[in-house]
Image (cartoon, rainbow, N blue to C red):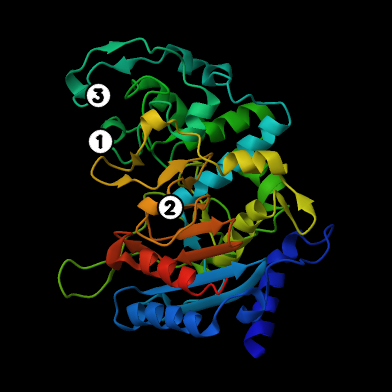
Amino acid sequence: MLRIQRLTAILLMTSAPFAASIAQPTTLVPAEPESVGVSSARLRLLDTMLRQHVDDGRVAGLVAGVARHGKIVYLESMGWQDIEAGSAMRDDSIFQIRSMTKPITSLAVMQLVEAGRIGLDDPVSKYIPSFADMQVFVNPQDPDNSPTRAPSREPTIEDLLLNIGGLSHRDRELYMSRQVRSRSEPLDVLVEKIADVPLMGDPGAQWIYSESASVLGRVIEVVTGQKFDAYLDEHVLGPLRMPDTAFHVPADKVDRLARIYQVPRDEGALTQVPDMDVPITTNPPLLEGSAGMVSTVPDYLRFLQTFLDGGTLDGERVLSAPLIAEMTKNHIPEALLPIGLSPQSPMLDRGWGYGFTVVIDEAKSEFGVNNGEFGWNGSLGTFSWADPETDTVAILMLQIAPSGAYSLSGKFKALVYQSLLN
């Protein structure tokens, strides 16, 4: 009971900055697992597995949360935010969520679609004129020596939401060699640099995990006249009471920042990864909609619960139920499947919605998942999904490179599903 009371206090505290005009939360309060069809005994197995990774020194620390039917049945922090400083992990520790920023950006785009201010079929050049002049590599495998040609058509807003616009990724050699992305340069500069690099293929011709969401962040700025972070604060993060989700960690929250650790190649100890050129504790010029945000497990539980609840959380609607349904279903045509971060790692069971992967063939999954499950991960070990069939949300946050070390997210997922009683 003391644990339940403490979790309630944490969740109410995280929503306090936005509570003045909104009633106290009625969802995502702690509950006894069996009251919502979850096994306490099996959750203890999950807890033991996670703690073993921390106790063995494989990961510095982590926070994990599970909610079912709008009630939190598991929220635990373990290990260290900062080993060297002796700073213990907290339930509200702050993590760099990297690509888990994409669904937040996509929700903001869909709000403007709902308001009639953006059309899914609109060419990106309607908002960013330089996209009208983009070229395509004839041989994208050898871009340095490839001629270019005009694309079959211009990329659209929906192309960017689906990663089928022909853009490349910030970590690919194509963009890195051309210094496309720097946290020291603002979003409009990034987008113009992207527009100056030829496409990897015709829009709509292939799925390429890309910097598309950052371009969409700039579209939001152009349409609304607001900075991207200001728009999110007003229309997404504020209404959903996600006060620790932002593009940097301010000075008064640095004591909650989880540091990044590199997994050793041998039997050595974890080593802390140096800060970026513009540290995550500095308000960056670049407001990167693809990978720039920080968040907490309590905040992101609220974000995904909103999708299970049809776009409304605690009486605050951020998007209509029909558009929530559009965001969380596959829009990738059969001809472009399977998708994957690389040809060597196809996601045979998944398609892509607007900002999320979506399970479309559960029989091809390595886990016991359900069709319709949606979610996405971050390149530093953050991991999330929501399952409409079982009405479950699960979040795992840690900061480790490489993010897939020890297959911890897969073990977490398997044990969460095994804890469900019905």
Residue 315, percent from left and from top: 80, 56
**Can residue 385 be seen by looking at this rendering?**
yes
Which of marks 2 and 1 precedes in the sequence?
1
Residue 419, percent from left and from top: 50, 75
Question: Position of 225 compared to 137: left or right?
Answer: right
| Front in this rendered view, residue 9 or 279 | 9
Nearer mark to the viewer, of 1 and 2 = 2
Q: Image height check: is 279 above or below 184?
A: below
**Which residue was labeled with disc 3?**
140
Which of marks 2 and 3 precedes in the sequence?
3
Which of marks 1 and 3 precedes in the sequence?
3
Amino acid, disc 1: Glu
**Which residue was labeled with disc 1?**
173
Q: Image height check: is 167 above or below 416?
A: above
Question: Position of 404 compared to 218: left or right?
Answer: left
Amino acid, disc 2: Glu
**Can residue 85 be seen by looking at this rendering?**
no
Q: CA distance from mark 1 to mark 2?
A: 34 Å
Report crowding for label 3: few under 14, some 14 to 19, many 20 or more residues within 10 A (C-alpha). Answer: some
**Which residue was labeled with disc 2?**
362
